[in-house]
Image: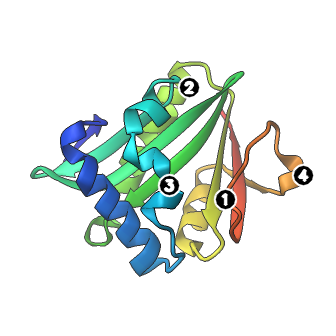
Amino acid sequence: MEICRYREQYRQQIIDLILHIQNEEARIALSIEEQPDLLDIPLCYEKNGGGFWTAVENNEVIGTFAFMNYGGGNAVLKKFFVREDWRNKKIGLALYETVISHLKENNYKLALLDTPSVAKASHRFYEKTGFKKITPEQLPFHYDYPDRDSYLYLLKL
């Protein structure tokens, strides 16, 4: 398994993986049109100082994790997904550690994320890794999160 920065050759696999998990597994009904960031990852993530990583095995995308730079040492974590048949194999942890290490090395102070309320396993993961659940009123910077049944989590780096 290799963790690498975004590569255009994996674009469609990334889209397919994310849409499958969101719509088939979590049943939250998100279309690609509601996620234009997936259609231009270099512009939406990398151009402004963010990053997008993929976990790849035998040229197949098995996981993703990204962040957007919100300035002032603030990052918003996005698109953290691991293919079902690769879960419980520490792929998520490896992606998480890659992104968090990058944030720390680049002097980020806060990492924020939103996650669907139905994603119970994700909530446990975030809480085990030090994230604290917050309310919208506790947001430390302006962030327009999706108008869905989501929870917000914050990590001080």
Q: 55 or 42: nearer the eye?
A: 42
Instruction: Please tell me whether mark 2 sits on a helix, a strand or a loop.
Output: helix
How is the rendered protein coloured? Answer: rainbow
Helix, strand or loop for disc 1? loop
- Figure quadrant of residue 6: top left
- Residue that mark 4 sits on: 137
* Left or right placement of residue 149 versus residue 1 in this view: right
- Seen at 47% across and 59% down, the residue is 33
Marker disc for residue 104: 2
Question: Sequence order check: which comes first, mark 2 or mark 4?
Answer: 2
Pointer 3 residue = 35
- Single out the mark in the foreground, 3 or 2: 3
Q: Are marks 3 and 1 in contact (CB under 8 Å)?
A: no
Res. 89 visible in picture: no
Q: Earlier in the sequence, mark 3 or mark 1?
A: 3
Between 142 and 37, the residue placed more toward the observer is 37
Hey, what amino acid is under mark 1?
Pro
Residue 146, label in figure: 1
Q: How many marks are shown on the rendered structure? A: 4
> How far is mark 3 from mark 1, CA to CA?
10 Å
Residue 125 drawn at (x, y percent): 55, 61
Q: Nearer the viewer, mark 1 or mark 2?
A: 1
For the residues labelled 4 and 3, the Cα–Cα distance comes to 25 Å
Q: Position of residue 8 (x, y in %)?
A: 24, 38
Can you tell which of label 2 and label 4 is closer to the viewer?
4
Indicate the quadrant containing the C terminus: top left, top right, bottom left or bottom right.
Answer: top right
SS at mark 3 in the image = loop
